[in-house]
Amino acid sequence: MSLFITFEGLEGSGKSTQARLLYERLQIRGYPVILTREPGGTRIGEMIRRILVDLKHTEMAPTTETLLFSAARAQLISELIRPYLATGGIVLCDRYSDSTYAYQGYGLGRDLDELHAITKAATGDLMPDLTLYLDLTAEEGLERKRLAARVNRGEQLMTPSSPSSSNNAQQEPAWNRLDARDLEYHQRVATGFQELIQRDPQRWRKIDARLPVHEVAHLVELEVEPLLAQITLLEQDS
Ligand code: TYD
């Protein structure tokens, strides 16, 4: 048996931090686990990500945007997710197809049936066993994101000669093309997530993202715990 767990939430919800903390905890406990993200996670996917977030790409058509997210996802599934699940491991993914329904569907107004067809082609209907939704309002999320972007800019000014890094997260601007959309867009996305949760409550767990980081991490671990029994621990070197 394997386990596929995804993290979803609005910008600034802290899902990337929580995905990393869960990854570290599971690793320490001896579980076979990988952490990846969307869009990205592969060489090709990270290149697609750069195209998607670039502030200069104001002319990008909604269909192009949708297909690029799906292309990155198709690559991630074929290169990383399916092979790792086949070994009986745990895959943690920071965003997945629910983000396409919430952002391109509810946010941009793309037809949900059309998105379903595109998603089916990209994923072969691979669905997560569990999806953790880090819950907060669009206003709270954007405020956190703006604050983080400001802190990040300050740090960049203080360290002008920082060495070039292969870490894509560091090369990316803290405020990108997709964050820059207006509050109403992010509110539609938030409504979209709530509707997706209502439609499939078995798969989703809502967690209050306004709690302190360590409390959110504890709640995340509690939700994951019952599913771990089916995973075989890695053999430890003695
Ligand atoms: P992410 O790296 O999770 O950024 P953040 O931490 O700021 O939330 O996601 C990048 C952006 O891509 C984010 O604005 C959400 C958006 N997105 C979509 O619009 N559709 C998708 O299918 C996915 C996976 C992400």
Image: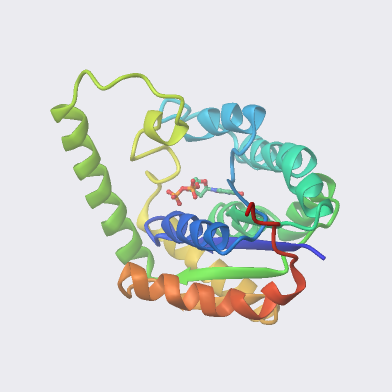
- Give the camera-side residue of 183 and 14: 14
- 127 left or right, relative to 169: right
Q: Quadrant of the C terminus?
A: bottom right
Give above or below for 79 relative to 106.
above
- 202 left or right, relative to 56: right
Residue 205 position, x and y percent, is: 57, 77
Q: Quadrant of the N terminus?
A: bottom right
Give above or below for 135 relative to 96.
below
Residue 21 position, x and y percent, is: 45, 59
- Give the camera-side residue of 236 and 79: 236
Residue depicted at x 19% and y 35%: 155
Give above or below for 221 relative to 32.
below
Colour logic: rainbow
Give above or below for 19 relative to 158.
below
| Residue projecting furthest to the front | 238
Residue 118 position, x and y percent, is: 78, 47
Residue 183 position, x and y percent, is: 36, 57
Residue depicted at x 40% and y 73%: 216
- 195 left or right, relative to 212: right
